Image: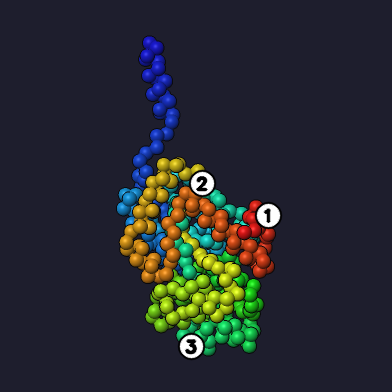
Amino acid sequence: MRTFLGGVIAALTMAATPVLADYPEREIQGIIQWGAGGSTDVVSRAVTPHAEEVLGQRVIMQNVTGGVGAIGLNQAERAAADGYTLLFGAENPLLYKVMGLGQKDYSDFIPINVLARGVPIIVTRPDAPFDTFPELIAYIEENPGELRFGSTGPGGLPSVVTAMINEKTPIDVTAVPYDGDGPALTALQGGAVDVMPAVLGAAIEAIRAGNLKPIAIFDEERVPQLPDTPAITETNPEFADLLPWGPFFGIFVKQGTPDDVVAKLTEAFQAGAQNPDFLALMDGRGFRMLSLSGAEAQDFLDTWQRQTAWILHDAEIAKNSPEEFGIERP
């Protein structure tokens, strides 16, 4: 009788305790914070097919734009913490709090993989009356308020690079916001804006096609993809103390997701990031590979947030002090 009762109790316990099935059993939703054709979109869609080979399931990608990426982030955060909703994001959420754009950021997520860092570049139309960064600054000084700078909203790469420029040499330009660098670069080529700080990876094909003119690599050194374009520190060495800096691209899953699911996703996207086709694409577009996960990924995010939040604060662009959120000055 005692053995019988023990078996009944064990059976009831097993029935009441959900058994974690083999993950993933169904398709996974992938939310991309930015619009089609932008750098986040290109990187996300390039790495995911290789991760799918490890996962054994499809990841259905969807562009959820708006709110400087906040709408996509909030949609991913509202989903269940079960690994069936992934957020393919860029750097902007780390600035939401200081920019007054929301109370959520990547602290609500687990970084599966911080894939790569982008190299910023300043581009303009081929017929622009300036060819170098000093010539651009001189033109702005002679024509205050005339030039339209393409933007992806507060906290996006264009706004951070513009803040860096303003810190060293104040400029009077008009920011025109778009939902991602893809639409903004299209607008630049169409004449709706005049100049744009962008990520090299999103602009390089238009540069190679002759539809955009590179003014300067906003980094400490030139890039092999555009060997004739000078680094900003060559003409303006005063920017050296702000560099290197650049946007990044990563995959995130909601906090509370089971450890074994996180491990499976991490394994899949690490494999995807090592795929030769993906590496060739990243190299061709000028991205600097990282492929960080776990503690390394979190350390990268924390360091990036400290550096950038204080750049925006010192440029008087941030609405709130980083200190309010425990973000220490680097």
Q: Are marks 1 and 2 in contact (CB under 8 Å)?
A: no
Q: Three-letter amino acid code at disc 2?
A: Gln
Q: Three-letter amino acid code at disc 3?
A: Asp
Taking depth in this image into account, of 78 and 39 the one nearest to the observer is: 39
In what element is the residue under mark 2? loop
**Of marks 1 and 2, which one's residue comes earlier in the chain?**
2
**Of marks 3 and 2, which one's residue comes earlier in the chain?**
3
Can residue 113 be seen from the camera position used here?
A: yes
Left or right: 93, with 260 as reference point: right
Left or right: 282, with 148 as reference point: left
Q: Three-letter amino acid code at disc 1?
A: Glu
Q: Quadrant of the N terminus?
A: top left
Quote the CA–CA distance across marks 3 and 2: 49 Å
Q: Quadrant of the C terminus?
A: bottom right
- The residue that appears at 67% across and 63% down in the rendered structure is 319
Q: Label 1 belongs to which residue?
A: 324
Label 1: few (<14), some or many (≥20) within 10 Å? few
Q: Position of residue 7 (x, y in %)?
A: 37, 19
Q: Position of residue 282 (x, y in %)?
A: 39, 66
Q: Label 2 belongs to which residue?
A: 255
In what element is the residue under mark 1? helix
Quote the CA–CA distance across marks 1 and 2: 23 Å
